């Protein structure tokens, strides 16, 4: 298939390369020229006005504003999509936005899959993502070769957009609060004089563990806050969760506390560091020393 692909960041690049390995022709675009250069060196094509029309468009950008811009803005990707083509929209957005975008696609004679992703950059590069997807059966039929290349598991959550984004919000609620809890746990452990490397080993084999703890805690142990996923992403994602909960009349005190910790970390200048840096913020409030990077 011919694919026009927007967003070649840590997740998007791995996804685009997975599509290339599966034999698809992928034309990528990204605001950062170095990302496009990396993609081209790996065998991809840069998307431009001379690129052939696409069978599918995949958008792996940050948020709803960017999604709308890359799909429907000036020179938006839908302009290069063949009639009846399919859009896979992978950003974390509110369910209502996904419904709105699906309606825009339908009005243009296109198919739309609300397809947020989970798994991290490594699984993206391996074609082993978890995709929480909803959309019409015809859209899934069209996108099947692409989903096969991208995902280890495709969770089909219904025939209409919105359910995929709702499920991603559930995932992000847990993921974000788990990272905040990890930050508190490691700062607490350091305050007790425990060796954080041993803490990670013990907790990973105990009931208190989580995937986020096991994935992020080693960043703190190594003093490595190179961003894989940033503090500021959680302002958006937990913000979406909070907005949905507020509309439903559901109190979310754990989410509210985690969101405030991420916001305070960002205001302290850590917004573009790895989200494990929430530990640095929490530790700093108690004068606790954490491992330094090499």
Image (cartoon, rainbow, N blue to C red):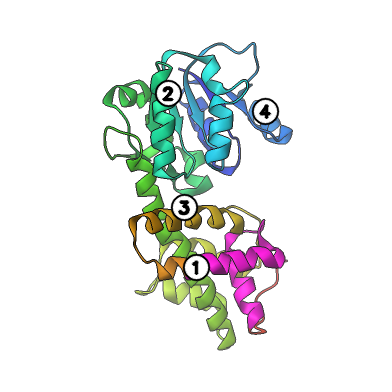
- When the figure is inspected, residue 217 is found, relative to residue 160, above or below; the finding is below
The answer, for residue 13, to whether it is visible in the render is no
For the residue pair 88 and 1, the one nearer the viewer reads as: 88
Residue that numbered label 1 is attached to = 258
Q: Nearer the viewer, mark 2 or mark 1?
A: 2
Residue at point 38%, 21% (across, down): 106
Q: Nearer the viewer, mark 3 or mark 4?
A: 3
Image quadrant assignment for residue 203: bottom left
Q: Which mark is residue 182?
A: none
Residue 152 is situated, as x and y percent measured from the top left of the image, at 37, 40
In which quadrant of the rendered image does the C terminus lie?
bottom right
Residue that numbered label 2 is attached to = 105
Q: Which mark is residue 240?
A: 3
Tell me the element at label 3: helix
- Chain-order first, disc 4 or disc 2: 4
Residues shaded magenta: 257-285
Mark 3 and mark 4: span between their CA atoms? Answer: 36 Å
Which class describes the residues within 10 Å of circle 4: few (<14), some (14-19), or many (20+)?
Answer: few
Residue at point 37%, 25% (across, down): 143
- Chain-order first, disc 2 or disc 3: 2
Which class describes the residues within 10 Å of circle 1: few (<14), some (14-19), or many (20+)?
Answer: many
Residue 253 is situated, as x and y percent measured from the top left of the image, at 42, 70
- Chain-order first, disc 3 or disc 4: 4
Mark 4 and mark 2: span between their CA atoms? Answer: 33 Å
Residue that numbered label 4 is attached to = 41
- Chain-order first, disc 1 or disc 4: 4
Tell me the element at label 4: helix
- Chain-order first, disc 2 or disc 1: 2
Left-right relation of 128 to 272: left
């Amino acid at each position: 298939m011919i694919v026009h692909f927007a967003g070649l960041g840590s997740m998007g690049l791995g996804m685009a390369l997975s599509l290339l390995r599966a034999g698809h022709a992928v034309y990528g675009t990204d605001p950062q020229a170095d990302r496009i250069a990396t993609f081209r060196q790996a065998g991809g094509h840069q998307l431009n006005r001379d690129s052939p029309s696409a069978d599918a468009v995949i958008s792996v950008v940050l948020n709803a504003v960017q999604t709308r811009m890359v799909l429907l803005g000036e020179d938006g990707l839908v302009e290069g999509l063949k009639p009846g083509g399919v859009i896979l929209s992978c950003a974390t957005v509110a369910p209502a936005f996904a419904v709105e975008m699906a309606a825009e696609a339908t009005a243009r004679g296109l198919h739309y899959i609300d397809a947020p992703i989970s798994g991290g950059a490594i699984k993206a590069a391996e074609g082993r993502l978890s995709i929480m997807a909803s959309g019409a059966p015809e859209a899934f039929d069209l996108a099947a070769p692409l989903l096969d290349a991208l995902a280890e598991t495709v969770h089909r959550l219904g025939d209409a957009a919105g359910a995929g984004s709702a499920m991603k919000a559930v995932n992000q609620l847990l993921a974000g609060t788990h990272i905040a809890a990890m930050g508190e746990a490691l700062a607490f452990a350091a305050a007790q004089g425990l060796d954080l490397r041993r803490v990670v080993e013990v907790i990973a084999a105990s009931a208190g563990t989580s995937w986020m703890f096991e994935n992020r805690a080693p960043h703190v142990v190594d003093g490595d806050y190179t961003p894989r996923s940033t503090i500021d992403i959680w302002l958006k994602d937990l913000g979406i969760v909070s907005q949905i909960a507020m509309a439903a009349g559901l109190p979310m005190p754990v989410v509210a506390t985690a969101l405030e910790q991420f916001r305070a970390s960002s205001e302290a200048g850590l917004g573009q560091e790895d989200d494990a840096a929430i530990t640095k913020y929490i530790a700093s409030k108690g004068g606790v020393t954490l491992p330094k990077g090499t």
